[in-house]
Image (spheres, helix red, strand yellow):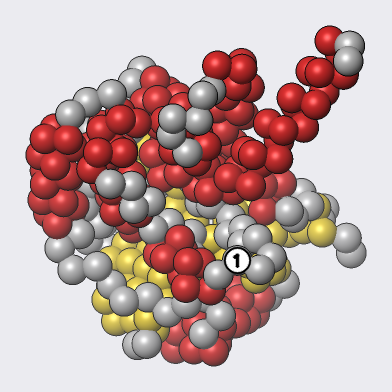
Amino acid sequence: MTARVREAAEADRFAAETERFRRELVAHCYRMVGSAHDAEDLVQETYLRAWRAYGGFEGRASVRSWLYKIATNVCLSAVRPRRMRVLPSGLTGPRAAPDRPPRQVAPDEVAWLEPMPDTRPPGDDPATAVIARESLRLALVASLQHLPARQRAILLLREVLAFSAAETAQILGTTTAAVKSGLQRARARLAELEPEPEELLEPADARARALLEGYLEAFGRSDVSLLEHVLRADATLEATPFRDWQAGRVNCLRMLDAYVLGAPGDWRMLPTTANGQPAAVAYHRDPGGVLRAHDVVVLAATVTGISRVVAFHDPALFALFGFPDVLPG
C-alpha cells in the first residue's frame, strides 16, 4: 500500500469517526462565543487540529470527548482577546418613550450577539432535539456570555452535554473539585441574570405558528393594530446595532409605527426558526422597488403572546439561514 493510499484510508476513517459530531460541535461553539459565523470557523479549526493529532489518538477517551476537548480549548483561546457579545438589553435599560429614532452604535464599539439557525439532522431523537433547542434559546445564550469563559465551558459541558465532572476536568485540564466549584458559581450567576426563565412554546406548536404568522402579516400590511394582538402587554423590542430598546407593548408599538413599519408592501417576511424559537427573515423594499435582505427577527412565543422581539440588522446572516440577498419580483 502506497503512502498516498494509506493517507486516503486514514482520512476516510477520520471522517467516519468524527463527521457525525459536526452539528453538535457547531452548537457548542456557538454557545461558547455567541456568534454563528465564528462558530463555523472554530469548528473548522477544531477539525483541522483533530486531523493533525489523529495519528496519535490512542482511544483512551471517546472520539466525542476528544473532539469536545479540542473544540472547547479552541473556543477558550478565541474568546480570550475578544469583547463579550451582547444584545442592546445587555448594555443599558429601556428607553422611557420612543421620542426619537433608536441610536445606532458604531461598528467598533460593541460586539453583538448573533442568532443561530436551527438545524436538526434527519432521524434525530425528538426528545434530544427539544433539549438541544432549549440550550440554544436566545436569552440563555445571551446570559452565558456574561459568565467567565471557563465557567461557561464547565456549565455547558456538565449541564448541556452531560459530561461527568471527571470527564469535564479531563477536557479542561483541571481537577474535579475545580469543576464542581466552577459549576456552582456559574449556576449562581445565571440565576442572577435570568432568575425565572420563561416557558417558551416550541416553534412547531400551533400557537407559536399563529403568533409568527400574525407578526408577519402585520409587517406585510404595515398595520400596527395587528401587532397589538400578538405582543404581550410586557413585551420588549430590541435590535442590533441600536443601543435603544423598548419595554412594554405601548412603547414597542409607538416605536414601530413611527420609525419602522412604513407603508403596506414595504416589508416582506419569510418564516424560519432560530435558537429553538419562531423567527423570520425580513426583506425591505428599497427606493428602486427591490426587496433586499434587511434583518433576522427572533420571537419569544409564549401561551399569552410574544414576550420578546429581537431583530438582527445584518444581511450577512441571510446566507447562513439559506435565504437570498434579494427576493425576485
Residue found 28% across the figure and 46% down from its top: 164
Q: Secondary structure at mark 1?
A: loop
Q: Which residue is mark 1?
A: 124
Q: Is residue 160 left or right of residue 49?
A: left
- Quarter of the picture containing the N terminus is top right
- Quarter of the picture containing the C terminus is bottom right
Characterize the local packing of mark 1: few (<14), some (14-19) or many (20 or more) Cα atoms within 10 angstroms. Answer: few
Task: Indicate the quadrant where residue 135 lies.
Answer: bottom left
294 to 205, vertically: above or below: above
Question: Given the image, on which type of amino acid does mark 1 rest?
Answer: Asp
Indicate the position of residue 308 as horizontal and vertical percent values: 37, 68
2 to 233, vertically: above or below: above
188 to 19, vertically: above or below: below
Q: Is residue 214 left or right of residue 29?
A: right
Q: Is residue 90 left or right of residue 131?
A: left
Residue found 75% across the figure and 26% down from its top: 11
Indicate the position of residue 56 as horizontal and vertical percent values: 55, 16
Q: Nearer the viewer, residue 132 or 195?
A: 132
Indicate the position of residue 233 as horizontal and vertical percent values: 29, 81
Residue found 61% across the figure and 76% down from its top: 216
Indicate the position of residue 93 as horizontal and vertical percent values: 21, 52
| The furthest residue to the front | 1
Residue found 29% across the figure and 38% down from its top: 168
Q: Nearer the viewer, residue 211 or 120?
A: 120
Q: Nearer the viewer, residue 287 or 301?
A: 301
| The furthest residue to the top | 3
Task: Indicate the quadrant where residue 153 lies.
Answer: top left
Q: Is residue 91 visible?
A: no
